[in-house]
Structure formats: C-alpha cells, structure tokens
Image: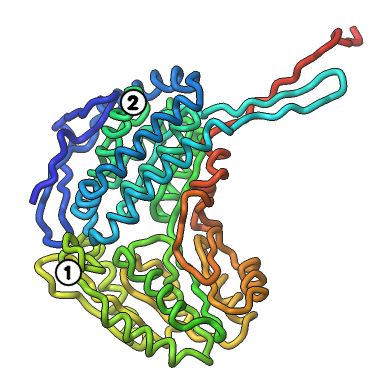
Amino acid sequence: MKAQPEASHFIDGVYVEDDAGPAIEVIYPATGEVIAVLHEATAAVLDRALASAKRAQTEWAATKPVERARILRRAADIIRDRGEELARLETLDTGKPIQETVVADWPSGADCLEWFAGLAPTVTGETIPLGRDFIYTIREPLGVCVGIGAWNYPSQIACWKAAPALSLGNAMVFKPSEVTPLGALKLASILVEAGLPPGLFNVVQGRGSVGAALVTDPRVAKVSLTGSVPTGRRVYAAAADGVRHVTMELGGKSPLIVFDDASIEDAVGAAMLGNFYSAGQVCSNGTRVFVQKGIKDRFLTRLAERTAGITLGDPLDGATQMGPLVSVAQLDKVLGYIDKAKAEGARLLCGGGRAAINTGYFVQPTVFADVTDDMTIAKEEVFGPVMAVLDFEAEEEVIARANATEFGLAAGIFTSDLARAHRVIARLEAGTCWINVYNLTPVEGPFGGSKMSGVGRENGRAAVEHYTQVKSVYVGMGPVEAPY
C-alpha cells in the first residue's frame, strides 16, 4: 500500500524535491507499514518558498476580492468532486476510518474555502465623520503568513488556515505535521488547478526546526499554529521576538457536564463522540465527563452497553467505526495513561488496553468511572480513546471543578433546563461551548480557546481580525491651522 506524492514540497505552483533534507517516513497506522518517504525542507527550499510567497502576495493583495473568491470556490468544488479519493488519502495518512474522513475532514475544508470565498467581498472599512474632516479605514492583508498544522486533522487544518489567509489577500507557507504530511500537498495542487497564482500557498515539510526557521524569518508577518501547549509556548515566544501576529489553537482538558434532568441517551452519545471519534485524537474532546449523582448508574450502564458495540478494524472498511492511534509514540503514551489511571484507583468500566488488530496502533475504547479531580487522567490531555467520568452533586460545585484547569478550549452542558444551561455556560472558562450537543464545529462559527488553550480564533467572521490589519486615514477638507 503506497501513497508516495510527486515530491516532498509544493512551491511556486509546482512540486519540488530536495533529498538533501533528512528523510520523513509516512506510516500507515493500521499496519505500521511505510507508505511514503519525504524529505525535510532545506534552507534553500525554505528560502524559495518564502521568496515566492513574498513576491506573489503583493499582486494578490491588489486583486479584487470577488476574483479571489471565485478561485477558492472552484477549489471547494474540486475537493467535493474528488471526495472519495481524498478521503482515502486522509485515512492512509492518519488511520482514521473512511466513514469519518469521507464526511468530516476534506468536506469541512471545502466548506471553509466556500464560506470565506463568500465572506471576502463583504469585508470593508468604515467612514468616521468629524464635521468638516473625516477618517476612513482600510482593512489590509498582513502579508506572508505561516501555518503550522497538527496531525489529527491535517487537511481540514490546512484548509482552515488557507481559506481566511488567501481570501483576505495574504500568502501562506504551510508546514504540516511530519506525522501526516500528505494532504496539504494535495490542497496546494488543487488550489493551483483552481486558478490560484503560483507562490500563494506553498507547502514545506519538516520537524520542529523547520517550523522554527519559518516563525523567525523576517519575511513572515503572521503565524497560525495548531498544536500542543509546549509547542505553542515556543512558537509564541519566537513570534513575539519579531512582533508578529499570532493565533494558536492548543490543547484542552474540556468538561462535559451532564445534569440529572438531561436525556441520558443524548448525553451518552455526545460523551462517546467527544471521546472516541477519531480514536479520541481531538483537541476539543470532553474528556472530563461530570455526571450528576442522581443519574450516574443509569448513565454508566448505558455508556458501557453502547461502547461495547463500537466496531474497531480496518480503517478502509466502511463498517469500521474506530481506527488506530496515529503513531506508535501516541500508542505508548495513551497506554501509559491507562496504566496510571488503574494504579491511581480509577474504576475501569470497559476497555483498558491495546486491541490486537494486525500490527496497528489500536487501543480499545476505554471508560474509567469514579475518577477524582486529582487523578492524572483528570488533569492531563491523553489524546486517545480514554474517557474519565466524574461524579458531582450541585451546580456551584461542578462549575468550580470544571474551571479548575489550566486549559480553556471547550465545554459542554446537557440539561433540559435552558436557563441553567445558559447560566452555567456563561461561567465556564472556555472559548468554544455547546449546549445539548458536542464537538460540532461548523466553519460559520469561531473556534478557539482561552487560558493555556490558545489565543485568537479560527473560522467565522472573527478570523478576519486575525488575517488583516486596519489602516486609518485622516482626510483634511480645509486649510491647515498652525500656531507658527
């Protein structure tokens, strides 16, 4: 099974290879098989990417927004037309089941390109009357943006960063995760096929050193990162040295609160989606499930029944509902958290170990009950199919416990009392919240976190603020008055 791209990088409208860079092996997580070998970007490759982006961006910024929009819309159409082919590539790259990638990954990317294509022509300035004189404002692109992607939603993330950047007149140099490097190359070629001028969306491969070189280059005006908190700290510091614009979507340890008047069936379904979808490798997952004591036993019984029915297996089989973790390193990390939860006294409800499927990196969907706030799995991001269920009695108590974390990415509430739902959501320290649903992230709405979970927002109109800057122009309509 092979997925070898034409070359490792995509720069100035064409695939580019430079095998002087260290090799990057692409592993199919379901079998451990090497399906492609790429090379890290050398200094020459990075310079070529940044130089072409700088050149192309000047003319692109002067292009009518509606003309930019047409290109992005065509790219969205191409993605939809090739949905099955792209979904298969995403599954090979990540190990996620084809039933997920065919509806969630590239389709979300196409939605994002289409939505920002519609938004871009509506972005305008304002006029501020001052009597005789007036001020007008212009919303300008920032210039060359760097996007750094994560491995869990590689193609979606590439689109989520490319769409606002390009629609608003910027260029982007994108570095995907070295673990999942294939989808971004396809996006770059699709954009050029749709009519995007060469140089405006370049893809370079590499590990952390490549990202560091991009973030610190003086030609770069803005950095957008999706990744872990430790990586975010380093990128934020490096970008600050050059006073660059930054948006960062980092990790989470999000609470999902289930009150005793909630629909148990809906709450169980949401908890499963918020812990087992993509084998639990979703940053906004509700991995701390707080269940009010009055329904705890019924909730756990139904959760165990439904979890037992999850189908693990070949991700390319349409019947498979959960695939492997993305890498052997992630497998070892998640198994380590499971062992620690057992040692610290959490009650294992189901799962609890590796699933013996081929030689892939599969972990059983795992639920721990009777988890307390001081246990490791209640404090640290596991990023695997491991759910922690905690008990609570009262509203004030659960709000305080839900907020007792350094993270602030997401939060959810299940209750039939909508007044309580809005009241509690208003007090939760999280940037992206849900009521009686979980983990739905349409591109029309902003997405991002607070506290250590990041700064800025992706998607929605909020993204305009992060890919443009305001120029203020004072217009004098009469003689200049001066005391000298």
Q: Is residue 317 visible?
A: yes
Q: Position of residue 222 (x, y in %)?
A: 47, 35
Provide the residue designation for mark 2. Answer: 195
Label 2 or label 1, whichever comes before in sequence order: 2
Residue mark closest to the camera, 2 vs 1:
2
Does dot 2 land on a helix, a strand or a loop? loop
Q: Position of residue 21 (x, y in %)?
A: 18, 35
Disc 1 residue type (three-letter): Gly
Disc 2 residue type (three-letter): Gly
Instruction: State whether residue 443 is above or below residue 393.
Output: above
Q: Residue at x 26, y 40 (%)?
A: 206
Provide the residue designation for mark 1. Answer: 313
Q: Residue at x 34, y 81 (%)?
A: 367
For mark 2, does the 10 Å Cα neighbourhood hold few (<14), some (14 to 19), or many (20 or more) residues?
some
Q: Nearer the viewer, residue 155 or 33?
A: 155
Q: Residue at x 23, y 44 (%)?
A: 182
Question: Which quadrant, please, contains the C terminus?
Answer: top right
Q: Is residue 218 visible?
A: no
Residue 185 shown left or right of residue 397 in the figure: left
Q: Position of residue 375 (x, y in %)?
A: 42, 79
Residue 451 shown left or right of residue 217 in the figure: right
Q: Position of residue 294 (x, y in %)?
A: 53, 92
Instruction: State whether residue 56 is above or below residue 431.
Output: above
Do labels 2 and 1 touch, CB within 8 Å?
A: no
For mark 1, does the 10 Å Cα neighbourhood hold few (<14), some (14 to 19), or many (20 or more) residues?
many
Instruction: State whether residue 484 is above or below residue 17.
Output: above
Does dot 1 land on a helix, a strand or a loop? loop
Q: Residue at x 15, y 53 (%)?
A: 27
